[in-house]
Image: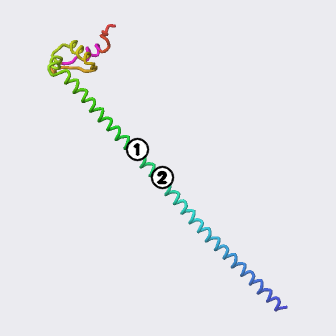
Amino acid sequence: MELQAESAAVEATGQATAEARARANAAEIEGEAQVTQSKLASEAQRIKTEAELKQKIANQEAEIAHLKSLNTLEIAKAKDLAVIEAKKFADVVSSIGADTICSMAQAGPEMQAKLLQGLGLQGYMITDGNSPINLFNTAQGLLGGLSPQQ
């Protein structure tokens, strides 16, 4: 009986030890699997974040290139318009002639207005630089000659 009891005790102890080792091994394997899964999840998140960052950088670089192109086109347009305006002015001045410009500068305001209208110019004011310009009277003329009393 004693041997059977001892044998049963040894068997129970062996079985408990084996079960404890099995649970410990299972827990260790499960822990390692969770660590590996966490590492893989963090690597996947890093890859995803890097891809999003690269996409944002590419979008910003494309936008910058587009804006540079638009600015270049705008500058070219402004230069072309300036050249056209300068040529137009030079053509008008050459078609008028130096003598006519001199006569316009010496002529009265009514004659200047008529000459400018005949040339199709609007918004120009010619003065010899010696006589002051009365802007109040000029504004009155622009408004159609309305006097302050009206």
Name the residue: 47% across, 51% down: 56
Q: Position of residue 3 (x, y in %)?
A: 81, 92
Question: Is residue 77 positioned above or below 60 on the image?
Answer: above
Q: Is residue 133 magenta?
A: yes
Residue under label 1, please give it: 66
Residue type indicated by callout 1: His
Which residues are drawn in magenta? Answer: 132-141
Q: Residues within 10 Å of mark 2 (few under 14, many from 20)?
A: few
Q: Are marks 2 and 1 in contact (CB under 8 Å)?
A: no
In the depicted view, which residue is nearer to us: 8 or 67? 67
For residue 147, which quarter of the picture? top left
Q: In this rendering, would 61 be left or right of 38? A: left
Residue under label 2, please give it: 55
Q: Position of residue 25 (x, y in %)?
A: 66, 76
> Could you tell which of marks 2 and 1 lies nearer the N-terminus?
2
- The residue furthest top is 149
Locate the C terminus by quadrant.
top left
Name the residue: 20% across, 20% down: 126
Q: Is residue 24 magenta?
A: no
**Helix, strand or loop at disc 1?**
helix
In the depicted view, which residue is nearer to us: 132 or 63? 63
